Amino acid sequence: MKFDTKVIHAGVKPDPSTGAIMTPIFQTSTYVQASPGDHKGYQYARSRNPTRTALEQNLAALENGFDAVCFSSGLAALDAILKMLKPGDEVISTNDLYGGSFRLMSQVFQKYGIEFKFIDLQDVENIAKHINSKTKMIWVETPTNPMLNIIDIKAVVEQSNENILVCVDNTFASPYLQQPLSLGADLVMHSATKYLGGHSDVIHGAVVAKTKEIADQLHFIQNAAGAVPGPQDCFLVLRGIKTLHLRVQRACENAFEIAKFLKTHPKVSKVYYPGLESHKNHHVAKRQMNGFGGMVSFDLHENTFDAAKKVLSSAQYFSLAESLGGVESLFGHPATMTHGSIPKEERLKVGITDSLIRLSVGVEDINDLIEDLDKALA
């Protein structure tokens, strides 16, 4: 199947009992057994649920993986990945990443003896000098949140070795634009709340594994720790995925036009978008992505929180809210919202200033969006 067919058909079959074309929501906690051990593959819904199984099979197909494992949120998915490590292990991570990921790594798992090195992965030669016998994982986020930096996944894999898992947070790109397993990565993580769900109505996370061995470890952790999504959440993500290719394509087209508009605006000092030729790693994005995404960040000449606040409170179609990847356009202020848990000095090192504004560009009419931004900036 080609990708546009996979989103609709992979892992999904009409319900055999009724012929329903949509996967049923199996709202049950347990399953009847004919006799001890004689069941239909399902015993208890924390371990398995048919709605979740359909979604996991669909996600595995979209990312060209062996299997997918679903969780109650993106951070629960990252939590499960980090639970594959043990005290004394070290992780090399990009230094420009989602604030929640940074918080989980630095304030939770570091307490249990796992060390994290946050470095600039745009220059892959940085990696080799930090690898040692304790290095067990390289954590890649690309495009990064919120600076839209691009990391060369294939080059990172080449810098690693067989003892190191390369994990990619593919939330910003979605499998429509980028498939890290095909570039050599071992694991792909998604906050499925974002582009996969696509309608701002579900919290969900997923990990896609390249091999059976990794998938088995994650399924064990999924069952043992219990951070599983409910069947209604899985149904909503499955529903959202059916239009993933259409939504993301439109968001990419809109974001490119907005990036060009912002680049020439007198009140804007910098624009961060991988689709612009001026972007540092535009050539890498062009090679490893099937489009440049629906996220755009920009800085103001008046580099103050008050200046950003005026813009953020003056739009009609861009709503100020957490999250991203829905059909509606959103404003974000990373310094006080998504990255508020990161110390200011660390934020400034990667370019997260008080005036930085992040856009999740939706699928509205592009002329309405540009006019809305123009009025807000005025």
Image: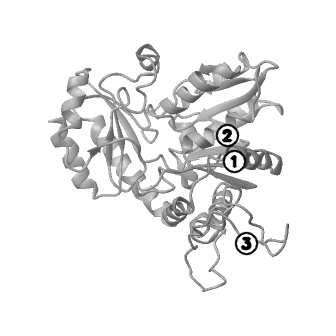
* Nearest to viewer (mark 1 / mark 3): 3
Query: Mark 1, residues whose alpha carbon is within 10 Å: few (<14), some, or many (≥20)?
Result: many
Which quadrant, please, contains the C terminus?
top left
Q: Along the line of sight, which residue is nearer the eye, 183 or 104?
A: 104
Q: Along the line of sight, which residue is nearer the eye, 23 or 6?
A: 23
* Residue designated by label 3: 32
* Precedes in sequence: disc 1 or disc 3: 3
275 relative position to 15: left or right: left
Q: Give residue 127's position: percent from left, percent from top.
A: 69, 22
Q: Which element is circle 2 on?
A: helix
81 relative position to 235: left or right: right
* Precedes in sequence: disc 2 or disc 3: 3
- Which residue occupies 28% across, 38% down? 262
- Which residue occupies 27% across, 46% down? 319
Q: Give residue 139's position: percent from left, percent from top.
A: 64, 32
Q: Which element is circle 3 on?
A: loop
Judged from this view, the residue extending furthest toward the top is: 345
46 relative position to 330: left or right: right
Asked whether disc 1 touches disc 2, contact meaning CB atoms under 8 Å apart, the reply is yes
**Location of residue 102 (image quadrant):** top right
Which quadrant, please, contains the N terminus?
bottom right
Q: Along the line of sight, which residue is nearer the eye, 293 or 205?
A: 205
* Residue designated by label 2: 80
Query: Mark 3, residues whose alpha carbon is within 10 Å: few (<14), some, or many (≥20)?
Result: few
Q: Is 171 located above or below residue 17 in the figure?
A: above
Identify which amino acid the numbered label 3 is placed on.
Val
* Nearest to viewer (mark 2 / mark 3): 3
Q: Which mark is residue 128?
A: none
* Residue designated by label 1: 222
Residue 378 visible (yes or no): yes
